[in-house]
Amino acid sequence: MQLQFWSIGKKNEAYVAEGIALFTKRISHYYKVEWKIIATTKNSAVLSAEDLKIEEGKIILNNLQKDDYLILLDERGKNLQSEELAKVLQKRNNDSTKQVIFLIGGAFGVSDEVIKRANFKWSLSNLVFPHQLVRLILAEQVYRACTINKNEKYHHV
Protein backbone atom coordinates (compact mmCIF):
# COMPACT_ATOMS: atom_id res chain seq x y z
CA MET A 1 0.00 0.00 0.00
CA GLN A 2 1.18 3.52 -0.74
CA LEU A 3 0.36 6.58 1.34
CA GLN A 4 0.17 10.01 -0.19
CA PHE A 5 -0.20 13.27 1.67
CA TRP A 6 -1.72 16.04 -0.43
CA SER A 7 -1.93 19.61 0.73
CA ILE A 8 -3.07 22.73 -1.04
CA GLY A 9 -0.90 25.74 -0.38
CA LYS A 10 2.70 26.82 -0.18
CA LYS A 11 5.74 24.62 0.25
CA ASN A 12 6.76 23.76 3.78
CA GLU A 13 8.40 26.48 5.83
CA ALA A 14 11.75 25.58 7.33
CA TYR A 15 10.32 25.43 10.85
CA VAL A 16 8.10 22.45 9.93
CA ALA A 17 9.99 20.92 7.00
CA GLU A 18 12.50 19.14 9.21
CA GLY A 19 9.81 17.47 11.31
CA ILE A 20 7.78 16.48 8.27
CA ALA A 21 10.89 14.98 6.66
CA LEU A 22 11.68 13.05 9.86
CA PHE A 23 8.23 11.48 10.18
CA THR A 24 7.95 10.86 6.45
CA LYS A 25 11.23 8.91 6.58
CA ARG A 26 9.94 6.93 9.56
CA ILE A 27 6.66 6.13 7.79
CA SER A 28 8.66 4.87 4.79
CA HIS A 29 9.78 1.91 6.92
CA TYR A 30 6.15 0.71 6.81
CA TYR A 31 4.69 2.05 3.57
CA LYS A 32 5.73 3.81 0.41
CA VAL A 33 5.01 7.45 1.12
CA GLU A 34 4.94 10.65 -0.90
CA TRP A 35 3.96 14.29 -0.39
CA LYS A 36 2.23 16.37 -3.03
CA ILE A 37 1.96 20.08 -2.35
CA ILE A 38 -0.63 21.51 -4.73
CA ALA A 39 -0.14 25.20 -5.43
CA THR A 40 -3.18 27.43 -5.21
CA THR A 41 -4.52 28.62 -8.54
CA LYS A 42 -2.78 31.62 -10.05
CA ASN A 43 -5.88 33.78 -10.01
CA SER A 44 -6.84 32.89 -6.43
CA ALA A 45 -6.73 36.52 -5.25
CA VAL A 46 -9.63 37.49 -7.51
CA LEU A 47 -11.81 34.43 -6.89
CA SER A 48 -14.49 34.15 -4.25
CA ALA A 49 -13.94 31.53 -1.56
CA GLU A 50 -16.50 29.25 -3.22
CA ASP A 51 -15.00 29.64 -6.69
CA LEU A 52 -11.53 28.97 -5.28
CA LYS A 53 -12.75 25.75 -3.64
CA ILE A 54 -14.29 24.69 -6.96
CA GLU A 55 -11.06 25.38 -8.90
CA GLU A 56 -8.92 23.57 -6.31
CA GLY A 57 -11.45 20.73 -6.30
CA LYS A 58 -11.04 20.25 -10.04
CA ILE A 59 -7.27 19.88 -9.59
CA ILE A 60 -7.74 17.37 -6.78
CA LEU A 61 -10.35 15.30 -8.61
CA ASN A 62 -8.26 15.26 -11.81
CA ASN A 63 -5.31 13.83 -9.86
CA LEU A 64 -7.27 11.10 -8.09
CA GLN A 65 -7.49 7.60 -9.47
CA LYS A 66 -10.76 5.66 -9.33
CA ASP A 67 -9.45 3.19 -6.73
CA ASP A 68 -7.71 5.74 -4.49
CA TYR A 69 -8.98 5.76 -0.92
CA LEU A 70 -9.38 9.43 -0.01
CA ILE A 71 -9.19 10.52 3.62
CA LEU A 72 -10.20 14.15 3.83
CA LEU A 73 -9.01 16.16 6.81
CA ASP A 74 -12.08 18.21 7.63
CA GLU A 75 -13.23 20.04 10.74
CA ARG A 76 -16.62 18.30 10.41
CA GLY A 77 -15.02 14.87 10.15
CA LYS A 78 -14.82 12.14 12.74
CA ASN A 79 -12.49 12.64 15.68
CA LEU A 80 -10.24 9.61 16.08
CA GLN A 81 -7.98 8.41 18.82
CA SER A 82 -4.56 7.26 17.64
CA GLU A 83 -5.58 3.61 18.03
CA GLU A 84 -8.62 4.21 15.82
CA LEU A 85 -6.47 5.76 13.11
CA ALA A 86 -4.23 2.70 13.32
CA LYS A 87 -7.30 0.52 12.72
CA VAL A 88 -8.31 2.62 9.69
CA LEU A 89 -4.84 2.12 8.18
CA GLN A 90 -4.78 -1.58 9.02
CA LYS A 91 -8.21 -2.09 7.43
CA ARG A 92 -7.05 -0.40 4.23
CA ASN A 93 -3.95 -2.59 4.23
CA ASN A 94 -5.98 -5.75 4.89
CA ASP A 95 -8.36 -4.82 2.06
CA SER A 96 -5.36 -4.51 -0.31
CA THR A 97 -6.00 -0.84 -0.96
CA LYS A 98 -3.32 0.29 -3.40
CA GLN A 99 -3.22 3.93 -2.43
CA VAL A 100 -4.50 5.95 0.53
CA ILE A 101 -4.48 9.71 0.08
CA PHE A 102 -4.71 12.07 3.03
CA LEU A 103 -5.94 15.45 1.80
CA ILE A 104 -5.49 18.80 3.53
CA GLY A 105 -7.71 21.25 1.67
CA GLY A 106 -7.11 24.90 0.92
CA ALA A 107 -7.61 27.91 3.16
CA PHE A 108 -11.40 27.80 2.66
CA GLY A 109 -11.77 24.02 2.69
CA VAL A 110 -12.71 21.86 -0.28
CA SER A 111 -15.53 21.78 -2.80
CA ASP A 112 -18.70 19.77 -2.30
CA GLU A 113 -17.53 17.43 -5.07
CA VAL A 114 -14.35 16.58 -3.15
CA ILE A 115 -16.36 16.07 0.05
CA LYS A 116 -18.64 13.66 -1.82
CA ARG A 117 -15.63 11.80 -3.28
CA ALA A 118 -13.97 11.35 0.12
CA ASN A 119 -14.14 7.82 1.48
CA PHE A 120 -13.54 9.03 5.03
CA LYS A 121 -13.63 12.46 6.71
CA TRP A 122 -11.26 12.90 9.65
CA SER A 123 -11.01 15.80 12.07
CA LEU A 124 -7.64 16.16 13.76
CA SER A 125 -9.06 18.41 16.46
CA ASN A 126 -11.75 20.92 17.31
CA LEU A 127 -8.96 23.49 17.32
CA VAL A 128 -7.88 25.34 14.20
CA PHE A 129 -4.24 24.93 13.14
CA PRO A 130 -2.17 26.54 10.40
CA HIS A 131 -1.97 24.24 7.38
CA GLN A 132 1.78 23.87 7.81
CA LEU A 133 1.32 22.48 11.33
CA VAL A 134 -1.48 20.20 10.15
CA ARG A 135 1.03 18.60 7.77
CA LEU A 136 3.41 17.93 10.64
CA ILE A 137 0.67 16.62 12.95
CA LEU A 138 -0.65 14.41 10.17
CA ALA A 139 2.77 12.91 9.48
CA GLU A 140 3.38 12.27 13.18
CA GLN A 141 -0.03 10.69 13.72
CA VAL A 142 0.29 8.39 10.71
CA TYR A 143 3.72 7.32 11.97
CA ARG A 144 2.20 6.72 15.41
CA ALA A 145 -0.54 4.59 13.81
CA CYS A 146 2.11 2.53 12.03
CA THR A 147 3.92 1.85 15.30
CA ILE A 148 0.65 0.93 17.03
CA ASN A 149 -0.10 -1.61 14.30
CA LYS A 150 3.37 -3.14 14.72
CA ASN A 151 3.08 -3.05 18.54
CA GLU A 152 6.21 -0.90 18.80
CA LYS A 153 7.18 1.32 21.74
CA TYR A 154 6.63 4.79 20.25
CA HIS A 155 2.99 5.05 21.38
CA HIS A 156 2.36 5.08 25.13
CA VAL A 157 -1.09 4.75 26.62
Image (cartoon, rainbow, N blue to C red):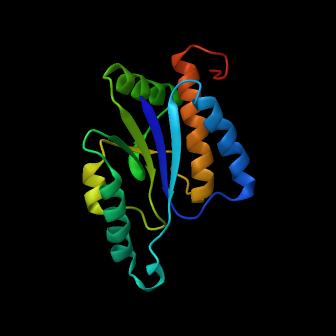
Q: Quadrant of the C terminus?
A: top right
Residue at the extreme top: 151
Q: Position of residue 45 (x, y in %)?
A: 48, 83
Q: Is residue 27 above or below residue 104?
A: above
Position of residue 126 relative to residue 113, above or below, is above
Residue 68's image quarter? top left
Residue at 65% x, 44% y is 20
Question: Residue 108 placed where, x, y %?
Answer: 44, 68
- State whether residue 50 is above or below residue 82: below
Q: Is residue 144 left or right of residue 43?
A: right
Q: Is residue 44 above or below residue 141?
A: below
Quadrant for the N terminus in the image: top left
Q: Nearer the viewer, residue 154 or 12?
A: 12
Residue at 70% x, 51% y is 16
Which residue sits furthest bottom?
Answer: 46
Figure quadrant of residue 156: top right
The residue lying at 24 percent from left, 43 percent from top is 66
Give the residue displayed 70% in from the left and 43% down from the top: 19
- Number of marks: 0
**Residue sitting nearer the eye, 65 or 113:** 65
Q: Is residue 128 visible?
A: yes
* Towards the viewer: 53 or 38: 38
Q: Is residue 125 visible?
A: no
Q: Residue 147's spot in the image, x, y percent?
A: 58, 21
